[in-house]
């Protein structure tokens, strides 16, 4: 079969030390769960290809399409602060790259397609539940407008895998701007392979930051731009209550996309110290710590680039530190600018920061739902008659009432009329997020009964997160008390 996927595999043309050539492991009885037809079209692929048995075999690695060059990429990483000099794609295989309809180079990767030389005694497989979780959350992030890897397809393998129990196996076909990570640079830095570091940096610049190539100091410009993208990305996570869960350096994309949706989740009740991951024992990657952890990870990237920044080590270190010092300003501009928009503050006045922080503090003390509070404030911005819907989210409603007095006084200095203000807020305050209890219900139906109707319904709702969708309002409800305590797991 000749598969009409227009591969152009630049990473596979890099030196052999960057990857291992490996074929996916064939599976018994592949079956398509979901195809992202719109994304396939963006990639220049006819979705009907995957409607055939041969096409589904491509999605699980049983059939290698023409032009693919399957590889597992090498990288290292700090995992919860501990450096591991070799990690790599242990259960993911990069089929190849395509140039999409906008002219952007995109990776197509199979996740859960069998062991690789980097599997570290793992089986290289994925269970259905984590595959559906990544499909749901990554597509929800895309709909929210947050840079992210995408899900092209989810398919079952017809085989079972063993985790804590026997589970149905599955493969996620993931699309990314690239899979180059901070850990990719660490892999070569740990080996003191400066030539490979330079080769990787030049490749990353050409692929993701081409304007840096013309700068007086290209590697410094590259570092500055990676820092800027990551600062803005993490700010956008916080603005929708997202917690990545495993912000290790091998899970930080150089392209500035959210990648590797393992034990991630969205907050229901607002709490800066919120942690969902079962393996984050000490809260290293708690909600409010994510900016600091991003900065820490970027410092590890800067360490790797020292040999490229200057022949004089002291000068190189000074450049790296100067670049890293710019993170806070980038993050604060993106985060506080986003909070202003969430509260309809289009202008900037003294005291705004205190107003915004006071709301968050009162939400935390009163266990207010993060998403619902901001969404209901949209209507409250248009009319005080909508205040009751907001104050009902606070254990002590007076805490909101007191804050709202100052907010309304502040809104008097804004130029928009009430309706325009409400509409602007609705464009940045989602009504729907992947609520944890909803995601778990979808996974349970799929795993226990092979019922994918809840999966399809949730995807449909999350595809328009800023719309009211009156017929699906219950999807915005917080979890019942019995499901409020929640943990996520890595899935490996």
Image (cartoon, rainbow, N blue to C red):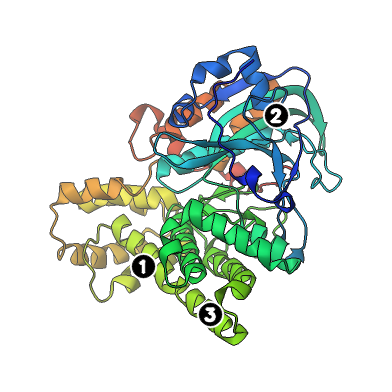
Q: Earlier in the sequence, mark 3 or mark 1?
A: 3
Q: Residue at x 57, y 19 (%)?
A: 50
Where's residue 483, x and y in %? 60, 43
Where's residue 431, x and y in %? 38, 42
Secondary structure category for the residue under label 1 = helix
Graded by Cα atoms within 10 Å as few (under 14), some (14 to 19) or many (20 or more), the crowding at tag 2 reads many
Q: CA distance from mark 2 to mark 3?
A: 44 Å
Looking at the image, residue 241 lies above or below residue 323 = above
Whether residue 159 is visible here, answered yes or no, is yes
Q: Quadrant of residue 100?
A: top left
Q: Residue at x 77, y 34 (%)?
A: 114
Query: Which of pointers 2 and 3 indicates the residue nearer the eye?
Result: 3
* Numbered tag placed on residue 170 in the rendering: 2
Closer-to-camera residue (193/81) = 193
Q: Residue at x 58, y 47 (%)?
A: 484
* Numbered tag placed on residue 321 in the rendering: 3
CB under 8 Å between callouts 1 and 2?
A: no
In the rendered view, does 56 fall on the left or right side of 357? right
Q: Earlier in the sequence, mark 2 or mark 3?
A: 2
In the rendered view, does 173 fall on the left or right side of 355? right
Closer-to-camera residue (9/252) = 9
């Amino acid at each position: 079969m000749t598969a009409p996927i227009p591969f152009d595999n630049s990473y596979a043309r890099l030196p052999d030390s960057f990857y291992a050539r490996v074929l996916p492991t064939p599976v018994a009885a592949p079956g398509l769960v979901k195809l992202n037809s719109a994304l396939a079209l963006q990639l220049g692929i006819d979705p009907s290809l995957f409607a055939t048995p041969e096409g589904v075999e491509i999605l699980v690695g049983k059939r290698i399409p023409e032009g693919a060059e399957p590889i597992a990429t090498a990288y290292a990483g700090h995992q919860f602060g501990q450096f591991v000099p070799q990690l790599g794609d242990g259960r993911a295989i990069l089929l190849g790259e395509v140039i999409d309809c906008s002219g952007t180079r995109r990776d197509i990767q199979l996740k859960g397609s069998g062991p690789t030389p980097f599997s570290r005694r793992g089986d290289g497989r994925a269970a259905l539940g984590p595959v559906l979780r990544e499909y749901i959350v990554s597509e929800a992030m895309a709909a929210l407008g947050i840079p992210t890897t995408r899900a092209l397809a989810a398919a079952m393998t017809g085989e079972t895998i063993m985790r804590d129990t026997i589970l149905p196996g599955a493969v996620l076909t993931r699309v990314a701007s690239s899979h180059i990570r901070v850990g990719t640079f660490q892999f070569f830095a740990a080996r003191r392979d400066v030539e490979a570091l330079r080769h990787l940096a030049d490749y990353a610049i050409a692929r993701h930051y081409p304007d840096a190539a013309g700068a007086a100091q290209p590697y410094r410009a590259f570092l500055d731009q990676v820092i800027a993208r990551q600062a803005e990305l993490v700010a956008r996570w916080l603005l929708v209550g997202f917690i990545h869960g495993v912000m290790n350096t091998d899970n930080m994309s150089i392209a500035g996309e959210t990648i590797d949706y393992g034990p991630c989740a969205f907050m229901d009740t607002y709490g800066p110290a919120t942690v969902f991951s079962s393996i984050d024992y000490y809260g290293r990657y708690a909600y409010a710590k994510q900016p600091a952890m991003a900065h820490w990870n970027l410092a590890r990237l800067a360490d790797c680039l020292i040999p490229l920044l200057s022949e004089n080590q002291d000068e190189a270190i000074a450049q790296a530190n100067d670049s890293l010092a710019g993170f806070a300003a980038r993050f604060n501009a993106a985060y506080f600018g986003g909070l202003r928009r969430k509260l309809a503050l289009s202008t900037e006045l003294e005291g705004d920061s205190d107003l915004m922080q006071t709301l968050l503090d009162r939400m935390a003390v009163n266990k207010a739902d993060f998403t619902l509070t901001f969404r209901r404030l949209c209507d409250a911005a248009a009319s005080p008659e909508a205040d009751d819907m907001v104050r009902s989210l606070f254990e002590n409603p007076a805490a909101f009432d007191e804050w709202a007095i100052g907010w309304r006084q502040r809104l008097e200095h804004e130029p928009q009329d009430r309706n325009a203000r409400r509409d602007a807020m609705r464009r940045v305050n989602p009504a729907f997020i992947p609520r944890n209890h909803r995601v778990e219900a979808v996974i349970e139906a799929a795993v226990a009964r092979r019922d994918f109707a809840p999966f399809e319904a949730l995807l449909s709702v999350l595809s328009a997160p800023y719309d009211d969708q009156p017929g699906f309002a219950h999807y915005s409800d917080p979890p019942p008390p019995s499901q409020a305590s929640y943990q996520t797991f890595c899935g490996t």
